[in-house]
Amino acid sequence: MNSHENLMSPEYKEAIKDLLLQLADDDFMYSYRGSEWLGLAPHIEADIASSSISQDSMGHAAMYYKLLEDLGVGEANELAHCRVANERKNSILTERVNGEGYYMDTPQYDWAYAVVRSYFYTQAKKIKIDSLCESSYRPVAEAAVKVRMELYYHRLHWETWFKQLMNSTEVAKKKMNDAITLVMDDFGDVFSYGNQKQAIETNRLIGTEEELKENWKESITPVFLALQMTVPFIPEKPIKNGRNGEHTKDLDEALITLSEVYNLDPVAVW
Amino acid sequence: MTSLLITAEEQEEQLAHFMQRIEAEDKIEADDWMPEEYRQTLIKLISMHGMSEIMGALPEKEWVPKAPTLNRKLGIMAKVQDEMGHGQLLLRVTEDLLLPYGKNRGDLMQDLFNGDLKFHNVFHMETKTWADAGVIGWLVDGAAIITQTNMLKASYGPYARALQRICAEEVFHAQHGESIIMALAEGTNEQRAMVQESLNRWWEPLLMFFGPASKETTGSSKQDLTIKYKIRTKTNEEFRQLFFDKYIPRILSLGLTIPDPTLNYDAESNLWSYKQPDWNEFKKIIKNQGPRSQERLNLRRHSYEYNSWVREALSATVR
Ligand SMILES: [Fe+2]
Ligand SMILES: [Fe+2]
């Protein structure tokens, strides 16, 4: 048990636990969706690059789950594989399917959606990570510094894809605009801290929801201006708030797949 | 009219010079003159190797989202990514060889789709359990290490150099697979049964991986040509024997049974005798009539076509 934990008030501990679950579950689901794309990207180079990003993101999730384990919340693998949907804190955006169809059959995955979701998500992640580097909770601030280095390339990668496809054929633009609508419909809980908002913010674990939303908009504005597009609007109230354990059936299905082997024997060593 | 046309005599000289370079273990480079037969042999070999890496990502990819721990998820993701990287590297080597024919990667994809370009028999097989992810890493990659390290000194420089990098990574893949298998073999009864069942299914495909001992079995074999041109030095059967030497003791030491009661080591000849796999089945598999051939090709074809708008968009952007 570290000195941090000794000094923590129950309220502080609850808040950090909740925030860490949000961060961990976000990257875990984002990486999971990315891993379904393996081998199916539009060309080999795109496959390799996005696979590398999915891997890094899984690494980030593992790091957050480990911090939770250190806090005594539970064993990292158990946290990742065992929790039921309404205990999960990831944003709705990260759990959405890649498109029609199951990854084991012949799915119709939408690359435009992959690019827009990844770009907007990664940009939001950058805003959070920048803020987390100043967190009052030292272990998460230290983790954020590590994530920031890798994230630099992720963001650059997806921004490049975004600009390229927005600057190309009419077909591509149409698909990209459709994807932007879908992604923004789900964007309402990306910057939400759910029921723990007050505790998370007053304990200075991370910047406020409002502040981060503003930073996100500001950060993507130059790209949108250059493309002569209006900056998308973040919905005020999410239809479902993943931070409070509200989820879609997409998550239920994902949980069945991702824990299929683990659940054969949760106490065995795999 | 004298300078442009090469006489038969000059042609022979050119070929003799080329074979001298091969004998002297000189490295042939992409822009060097090479006989048509050499070029064709290389294209066939390297494009098949490259496509097998890419098609080989599919059976393993089936287990990436299901990998049972965070570390296993990370490990198998990294491995699948490496395999795609190998595919990319090898298709580039092939593309250089294809230049005189004006063909490119898109043509190779079409060749794959219409069945002209084959991929390794093992990647036509079904995967059923998590143990398959371990067996593929440990034994399929292990088998690939045996054939590929034999070509590290291949006469064709670009292939030899690509193999340097590939083989270095394959060693990690085999360790990744072995680690999965060890965990299962040392685990619960159910886990041990899972590995044994997987090994039972993969044993024949693993033997087939090295190809038939002689071309009489399937009617054709490229082993004679690849040896003639010093692309490799050992025969299919020699590879298979090396595989037995290396892996049979390891498999047995894990308490697993090899699904061939006739398997026997002859100390005098230093050779293993074994039950031949069903070579008729092998012939079917390499004609894309294996258990999962059509599904995997279909998945590759479908995703390639479904995403064609992206490739079109990109070529419009860089214009
Ligand atoms: Fe490979
Ligand atoms: Fe490999």
Image (spheres, rainbow, N blue to C red):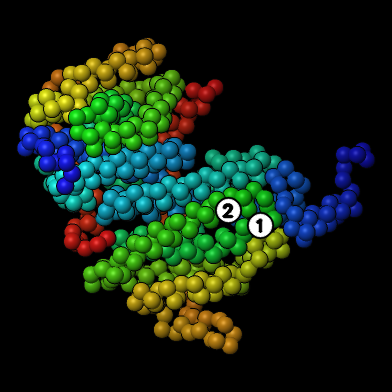
Determine contact: label 2, label 1, CB under 8 Å: yes
Vertical placement of residue A221 versus B195, above or below: above
Locate residue A261, reporting x and y percent: 24, 57
Relative to residue A260, is residue B221 drawn left or right? Answer: right
In primary-sequence order, the first of circles 2 and 1 is: 1
Q: Is residue B228 visible?
A: yes
The amino acid at mark 1 is: Ala
In which quadrant of the rendered image does the C terminus of chain B lie? top right
Please, which residue is most extreme toward the left here? A10
Please give the label number shown on residue A83. none
- Which residue appears at 67% of the width and 50% of the height? B157
Q: Is mark 1 within 8 Å of ligand 1?
A: no
The amino acid at mark 2 is: Leu
Q: Within 10 Å of the Cα at label 1, are there few (<14), some (14-19), or many (20+) other Cα atoms? A: many
- Which residue appears at 63% of the width and 53% of the height? B160
Label 1: which secondary element: loop
Corner quadrant of residue B173:
bottom left
Cα separation between marks 2 and 1: 9 Å
Label 2: which secondary element: helix
Please give the label number shown on residue B154. 1
The residue wearing badge 2 is B163
